[in-house]
């Protein structure tokens, strides 16, 4: 996914037919690389629609298209991060229409700080684990997150 300003968010990406898409995986699944468009209108009749209902962090609808792996170039993975305050880094996965950011907060935050996010901002733990043993995830206004960075962490054909 991308932010409205064009910043690439955490995910996997590749180029097909001159256009960059998010990818389901950087490796073929059943012999194909699956391009993903989260939300919006279908990019074309050959794209398969998926209705997910409510899910974090993506929209309720996504479209996928399986293409031959040799047709996809510049396959890479990106990590986007931001800070709630100095040295409190969170990973950014999505932006909603109101400009809120979907974030995952791990061990850079103490269990008490993660609990504050649960109580004050409606965050959740993964698999209903206690906050002491789990990262937490939820939505925050973009104005609360500073020093946003997007970095390619892996490139498929890099030497």
Image: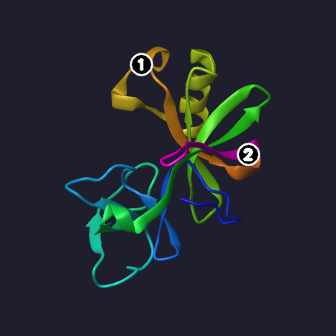
Circle 2: element type: strand
The label number, if any, that marks residue 91 in the structure image = none
Give 158 or 85, whichever is nearer the viewer.
158
Residue at x 37% of width, y 22% of height: 129
In the image, what residue occupies the spot 50% across and 31% down? 136
Q: What is the number of the mark on residue 130?
A: 1
In front: 43, or 101? 43
- In this orientation, which residue lies closer to the viewer: 42 or 121? 42
Q: Position of residue 130 (x, y in %)?
A: 41, 18
24 or 140, which is in the foreground? 24
- Report whether residue 61 is seen: no
Element type at mark 1: loop
Residue 88 falls in which quadrant of the image? top right
State the predominant SS element of the stretch in magenta: strand
Nearer the observer, disc 2 or disc 1?
A: 2
The first of marks 2 and 1 along the sequence is 1
Tell me which residue sits at (48%, 47%) in the image.
Answer: 156
Does residue 83 appear in this view? yes
Residue depicted at x 59% and y 61%: 2
Task: Confirm whether the magenta stretch covers residue 150.
Answer: yes
- Identify the residue under disc 2: 148
Question: What span is colored magenta in the figure?
Answer: 144-159
* Residue placed furthest toward the front: 159
Q: How far from the left and from the top, in percent, is residue 118? A: 53, 31
Q: Quadrant of residue 153?
A: top right
Spatial CA distance of label 2 from label 1 is 28 Å
């Amino acid at each position: 996914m991308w932010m409205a300003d064009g910043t690439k968010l955490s995910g996997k990406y590749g180029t097909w037919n001159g256009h960059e898409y998010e990818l389901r995986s950087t490796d073929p699944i059943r012999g194909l690389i699956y391009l993903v468009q989260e939300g919006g209108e279908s990019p074309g009749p050959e794209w398969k629609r998926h209705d997910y209902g409510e899910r974090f962090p993506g929209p309720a609808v996504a479209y996928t298209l399986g293409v031959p792996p040799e047709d996809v170039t510049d396959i890479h993975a990106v990590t986007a991060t931001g800070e709630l305050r100095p040295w409190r880094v969170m990973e950014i996965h999505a932006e909603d229409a109101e400009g809120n950011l979907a974030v995952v907060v791990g061990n850079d935050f103490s269990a008490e700080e993660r609990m504050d996010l649960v109580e004050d901002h409606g965050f959740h733990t993964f698999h209903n684990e206690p906050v002491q043993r789990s990262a937490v995830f939820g939505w925050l206004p973009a104005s609360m997150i500073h020093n946003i960075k997007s970095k390619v962490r892996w490139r498929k054909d890099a030497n």
